[in-house]
Each structure stands twice: as structure tokens, then as C-alpha cells.
Image (cartoon, rainbow, N blue to C red):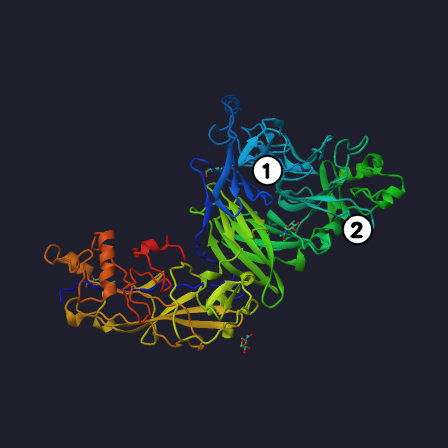
Amino acid sequence: TGAMYLLICLGIFWFFPLTLALEEDSPLDCVPRKSVNPHLFHEEGVFNYSTMLLREDLDLLVLGAREAVYALDLKDISKKHASVKWEVTEKQKTECQNKGKDPELDCKNYIRILHKMDDDRMYVCGTNAFDPECDYMSYSNGKLTLENKAQDGKGKCPFDPEQRYASIMDGNLYSATSMNFLGSEPVLMRSSPVSIRTEFKSSWLNEPSFVSMAQMPESENNEAGDDDKVYLFFSEKAVECDCFNKIVVSRVARVCKGDLGGQRTLQKKWTSFLKARLDCPVLEAQLPYIIQDTYLWCDPQQHWKNCIFYAIFTPQSDTSDLSAVCAYRVSDISRVFAEGKYKTPIHVETSFVKWVMYSGDVPFPRPGACINNEARNAGITQTLDLPDKTLQFVKDSPLMDPAIQPIGEKPLLVRRRVTFTRIAVDRMQAADGEKYHVMFIGTAEGTMLKAVNYDGEMFIVEEMELFQQQEPVKILKFSNVTRELYAGSNSGAAQIPLANCARSSTCMDCVLARDPYCGWDKVVGKCVALLDSQRELIQSVKDGNASLCPKAGKKYVHHTIQPSNLASTSWEWDNRLLIPSDRLQWLKDGLLILNASHSDGGLYRCLSVEHSKAGKYTNTVAEYQLKIGTGSGRDGQIVFPQAQKDGPSVTGLQVVVALLVISLVALLVWNFYKGHLPLPWKCGKKNSRKSPEYEEEMGVNCSERPTPAEDKLLSPAPDSSSSNNNHRGGEAGEENDPPDVNQHSLQYIDDESEI
Ligand SMILES: *[C@@H]1O[C@H](CO)[C@@H](O)[C@H](O)[C@H]1NC(C)=O
Ligand SMILES: *[C@@H]1O[C@H](CO)[C@@H](O)[C@H](O)[C@H]1NC(C)=O
Ligand SMILES: *[C@@H]1O[C@H](CO)[C@@H](O)[C@H](O)[C@H]1NC(C)=O
Ligand SMILES: *[C@@H]1O[C@H](CO)[C@@H](O)[C@H](O)[C@H]1NC(C)=O
């Protein structure tokens, strides 16, 4: 009777493992789902966890951070087996500071290189206060030990911790970084007894940003007697473009492993350094996209030619907020180097240089080619024997034509409003017998996307947050032994399983997620991992056909909160679609009716609309029969209806989830009559006139937040015919989960993690 303001919250904590077909409404937008990481690693006061070495032979993840290296349990990286510090000395710090660098940021030792050596030791390099150094490290008897055999790290490891670099080890270290303090001498170098590197020429490397490196065993069963190769991906300012402003382009370069340099020309330099432009044609892009990372995927049963480089790209101007994935066949890359034309500079007028395609005679042996049978037959058995003519040609014209095109001549995935930083790829044979490449993409926003291209349809299976803070993913590794992913950021490292099937609690969830790793097991009524199940599972990765699911109707399974906004939501009131207004507000997880009166009573229905290839699924997520009471007394009791049980959706498809919550609190009443009216509830005290959920929520909120003027969201009983006593505080976990007593006010929802 005394209600001046009546505040009603119809809150429902819903949420599906929502899926988004990119060809549908908002193809490039995405809102991340949240996810808990079971295994995180972070050590107090230590930052920049950005170097990783998988030691599957030792069951270790070796993690390089700033001034420290850790040996973590590969199966659970939160378990630290050993660590070793590698700090700069005071003297080094002072020298670094005297050269104008920041003592607390630049003048530290950032671990940048971690490789396994043939003798099982490890090779480790750090920036070492702008004076890079390398050392050997071993792991034995549960201890990591640095041998303190300081080696000059110039050309192996960057001076500047902010600079990008790349390296691989195959007995010799191949590194791509800057050789000097200023960062102005970029090289691709092999550290062997006789070190071989690139020329300091802008036609070779022009202010490059190195991205990644990989080796390819191209000598295997090679009829032409070709050599093994090392590929380097990077971006640089284009020399060949006669545009006013220098634009940046993406490149792949390669060298032959057997290269020893030339005799006179190109002495101790690569004679086989060739590079080509990499195209990733994103539709709306005016400027070329810039490569950021690659992942080499090879089928162990197939020829190296079928290996694929997956590469991620971001725009070079601020005018676009897209990121893309393009994939390149090794055979396509290799063909451009083996058969392509050369681009060559010609001097036009006085000082102007124009790059054109060279159409004259090419010297023999072919410039930049590895020593092969043809050369051997001509008496040239090593690069030292190569004629000057060939060497001079490649020295002047290491750039090939045409640019390398991705598979399908378009990106596999394009996403708006995220910045891709790292990628890893796994192949999974789905229930339909087909093998799909699943891309795991780390972003600058600290999330990881799991995406599949289903016959040209780009599809995001999942997007999850990896770290406590939203910070860029700096490294991403995949172990095919543990079948887990390992990600690193400035503040820590995370271990992520390839799939988290259990988060889908209904068949429809499970099927609509279109996750090739997961299928619905009818027998146990759970979404399970394909690899863990012997039974036939329901899965429809290509179509997302949820009609394959058995007609449910028996029982709703209640989700815990999975904040995710991928499906669209709408509300109906007595079968009329509601439109948001000052009085009716769409909350992220509920409907807020302000100044509610008797006329607001009626049937409220929350609808979720999801698209999949097989159709549009409209689900009634929850229904509420709302009756506005007077706020006190038996007659004014609020009705907390239960979610409807039988098939309410338009398509006749049963839905998932239901969960609800309701609350009705005449808080402001109390506020208004402050001091006059005692609280109708007391902490922990039961009020027999209210429904049990209501009381419990009150109890919880009362102890959590004593300010009574705040709105409270209450949980009604999820649809369970059993006792409601288990259900409290908006929690709607699986019925047998004892729900936490927590406070589901709106501000907490963001922090809530699923399952
Ligand atoms: C290292 O981590 C700190 C703390 O997050 C960050 O401010 C800094 O930029 C990082 N430095 C590098 C080189 O990544
Ligand atoms: C993992 O990958 C490596 C190299 O790509 C391969 O040699 C090895 O056989 C793979 N192991 C498994 C268990 O698939
Ligand atoms: C609610 O009612 C009060 C008092 O009648 C009024 O001042 C206020 O503007 C109303 N609020 C809304 C959102 O309608
Ligand atoms: C979905 O599956 C049902 C049941 O097997 C089938 O009848 C229907 O044709 C399928 N729809 C699509 C679009 O594949």
C-alpha cells in the first residue's frame, strides 16, 4: 500500500553457447564469451611471458619471461617444477641507461629465444639491457640451470624488447632480427661456424618487422635434387611501389639450408635469398594487410608440398578494424620462387628508381636457386662455385613476381573489431568423417577465437577470454601430444583445452555450437568430446541442424551464467513484442520495469533468436506470469512462475535453458519511509509469507550489501518439481550442483564465469 516506487526486475540469466554464422546478419561483429581457465601461470612481480618452448620429451613447458625462465608442467602449467633467474647486472643497467634507455623497461633482460638443441640442452637468448646475450640451459633433477657461457647475441636476439624477431633451430640457429643498437641493421642470419647473413640493402630488407620462420624438408624424395629451405615471414616497406608514401607489404622470403655464400660476390651472404609479396585480399581494404603471425600445418602422412601456412593479417591504416586469416600452400610459395619472374630496379631519369618485371635472359644457374642436380651436372656443387653473374643478379634483384595468392584467393576468415595477434591450427576429423582445420586465434583484446571454415562459410565456434586482464596474446603454442594450447601475455600464461564440450548442457546447444570436437551423447544426455566417446554422437558441423536432436520436453537444464551476447534477445508481453523505453529497459540479462503498476501484470516471455545454416531458431527461453502485488501481506504475494516446460518455440524445437529470476522489491518504499518501516526481512531470518527463494535472496543480499536502496535480482525456482531450497541467489546451475551463494546483481555478471 505504501509503495511509491515499485521496482521490478525480471532478471533472467540465460545464455547459450551462442554461435554466429558469419553470413548472417552481423557477419563481422562478435561479442566474446567468457571462460574460466583452469590452468594459469603467473609469478608475482614477473612480466612479459612471451617466449615458449614445448619440451614434450620432458613433459615441460619452458616459459621465458622478463629476467626469468620457468619449467612448468606441460599437463598443468600452474605447477612450476623449476625456474631460473637471468637478471642484468648493475653495470649493464647503468650502461644501458647512459645510452638513453629506460632503466625499468628497456634495461632488463627479456628472454626472446628458447630452442632445444640436439644434445637435449636448450639455447636461450635475452635482450640483456640492449646488449643481447645467449647461453645454454639444461634441465635435470628438477632444476633449470644456465651454464653462464655468455655468447654474443647480436644478430640472434633483438636489442630492443619491443622489436619483433623470429628464429628457428635445426642444429644451427636461424634468426631474423636487428644486429645493432639502433635497430637499423636488419638481418636474416644463420649462426654456423661460418655465419651467413643478408646484405644490408633496402632491396633485401627495408625496415622489416619479422614475424615467423619455418623450415621445410624439400630435399626429401626430390627429383630435382633440391635443398631444404628456411622460410621467413615479415612485413617491410615496399621498394617496388612507386607511390608517394611508402606502403608496407607482407612478404615471405626463403633461403637454402646448404647455402655457404659466394666466393667473391656475396661472400658470407645468402646466395639463395629470394622474397615475394604475400597477398591477403580483404575486400574493403585499400592498403595491403600486414602479416602478424603464421602457423605451419603439415599432414604427417603427406608430402611437404601439401603443407599449409596459416597467416593472420591486420590493416595498416586506422581506417579499417578488420583482421583476416589467409592460408597459403607451400607448393604455391615454392613455385613462385622456382619459376617466377624477377623484379628489377631500373633508373628512370636522374634519381628515380622504378621496379619492373625483368624479361631478359636469366643467367645460369638460376639466381637464388638452391644447388640442385642441374647445377651439379654443370660442375657447381656448392654455392661457393656459383658464377658472379648469377650472384650479382640475385644481389640486385631478390624480389620475385608475381605476389603469392592465398588458397581460394580470399581470406578464410575476416573479423571486425578485433586485432588478431597469434594463430595455431589443428585438424579434427568430425563425426561426418571429414577433416576440418580448426583455427585458434589469439587477439590483442586477450581473447581466443576458435574458428572453422566450413566449405567457404566462416564460422566462429567460440570466443573466450584467456587472462584476467584484457591484454594481447603475445604467444600461442599448440602441443599435439597434450592436445592443449598454451598462450602467453604480459601478465601470465594460460593453458587452454581444444574444446570445452561440457559447457553445452543441451543437445541444441551442443549441435548449434558446430564444434567439430563435440557431439551430443543421447545415452548420457551430455555434450561430450568426440575423442573421448565410443558411442555415436549427434553432431552437425556443416549445417548446425538442431532438428537432429531428440525432442526433449522432459526437463530443462539450467545454465549457469555464460555471459555472451551473440544471439539476439527480445521480450514479449501477452504476445506483443515489447519495445524498450524509459520505463522498460533491456538489461544484459533481464527486463527492468520501472514504476510498475497493476496494469503491467501478464505473461512475459523472453525469446532468443539464433541463426544457423539450417535455419532460424526462435527459442522461448523463459516465461513469467507477472502479477503486481501490493508489496505486503498474503494477498500481495508475488507469484514466481516456473519456466514453461513444453515445447514453446515457434519451430517446435525444444529449447534449452531456462532460468530465471525474478524479483520484486519495494526497496524505495523502505527508503521513503526510512526509519518508519523496519525491514520486512532480517539476515538469515525466514519470512513465511514470501516464497523461499525470495527470502534466501534477501538474506544473501542483506549480508552482502547492506544498502537496501539497491535493486535486487531474485532467483525464482528453476523448473524443478523438487524442493526449491537448493536454489538461491539467481544461480541456476545444474540442479545437482550446489549453487554458490552469490549476489547476482547486475554489476557482478561481468565477472561471472561459466561453469
Ligand atoms: C612488459 O610487460 C609490461 C607490463 O604489462 C608492459 O607494460 C610492457 O610493455 C611489456 N614489455 C614488452 C616489451 O612486452
Ligand atoms: C606432433 O607433431 C610432430 C611434428 O609436427 C610430429 O613429428 C609428431 O609425430 C606429432 N605427434 C603426434 C602425437 O601427433
Ligand atoms: C516514475 O514515477 C515517478 C513519480 O510518479 C516519476 O517522477 C518518474 O518520472 C517515473 N519514472 C519513469 C521512468 O517513468
Ligand atoms: C535436418 O535434419 C532433419 C532430420 O534428420 C532433416 O529432415 C532435415 O532435412 C535437415 N535439415 C537440413 C537443412 O539439413
Vertical comparison of 59 with 483: above or below: above
Residue on which the image places disc 1: 114
The picture places residue 250, in percent across and down from the top left corner, at 64, 46
What residue is at 79 percent from the left and 43 percent from the top?
Answer: 370
Q: Residues within 10 Å of mark 1 (few under 14, many from 20)?
A: many
The picture places residue 12, in percent across and down from the top left corner, at 33, 64
Instruction: Label 2: state its secondary structure.
Output: loop
Count every numbered label the image shows and give the total.
Answer: 2
Instruction: Label 1: state its secondary structure.
Output: strand
Residue on which the image places disc 2: 221
Q: Nearer the viewer, residue 132 or 567?
A: 132
Give the amino acid at mark 1: Leu
Instruction: Look at the image and tell me whether residue 319 can be seen.
Output: no
What residue is at 13 percent from the left and 55 percent from the top?
Answer: 674
What residue is at 44 percent from the left and 57 percent from the top?
Answer: 33
Left or right of residue 429, residue 90 in this image: left
Q: Nearer the viewer, residue 722 or 458?
A: 722
Separation of residues labelled 1 and 2 (CA atoms): 31 Å
Mark 1 touches mark 2? (CB < 8 Å): no
Instruction: Look at the image and tell me whether residue 267 can be seen.
Output: yes
Q: Earlier in the sequence, mark 1 or mark 2?
A: 1
The picture places residue 57, in percent across and down from the top left corner, at 61, 44
